[in-house]
Amino acid sequence: MTAWMREACAELGAPLGVVLEGGYALAPLARSVAATLAALTSKEPPAAVKTAELAAGARRLQAQFWPQL
């Protein structure tokens, strides 16, 4: 998502700010910071993602808790 936002902001000529929530689990937070910085500084375009497939998978997982989905 960071890479997509980087690309969108570049196309619009808009600045990009980043705020990461966390701090309770320091190792995962450190990995998140490193991944975010890597995406912000990469010269590579963001990878293509099949959004519809990801959304359908998330819906299936959540439907066990919310049957109306």
Image (cartoon, helix red, strand yellow):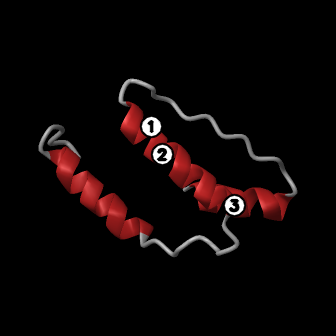
* In the image: residue 9, left or right of residue 22: right
Q: Do the CB atoms of the residues marked 2 and 1 lie less than 8 Å apart?
A: yes
Total number of numbered discs in the rendering:
3
Residues 2 and 29: in front is 29
Residue 59 coordinates in the image, percent (x, y): 26, 53
Q: Which residue is mark 1?
A: 29
Q: Residue furthest right?
A: 13
On residue 32, the disc is: 2
Q: Which callout, 3 or 2, points at the residue further toward the start of the chain?
A: 2
The local secondary structure at tag 1 comes to: helix
User: In which quadrant of the rendered image does the N terminus lie?
Assistant: bottom right
* Image height of 64 relative to 60, above or below: above
Gap in Å between the C-alphas at discs 2 and 1? 5 Å
Gap in Å between the C-alphas at discs 1 and 3? 18 Å
Instruction: Please name the amino acid that badge 2 sits on.
Output: Ser
Gap in Å between the C-alphas at discs 3 and 2? 14 Å
Q: Within 10 Å of the Cα at label 1, are there few (<14), some (14-19), or many (20+) other Cα atoms?
A: some
Q: In percent of the image, x 14 and y 42: which residue is there?
A: 67
On residue 42, the disc is: none
Residue 60 coordinates in the image, percent (x, y): 19, 55
* Image height of 44 relative to 58, above or below: below
Q: Which residue is mark 3?
A: 41
* In the image: residue 53, left or right of residue 17: left
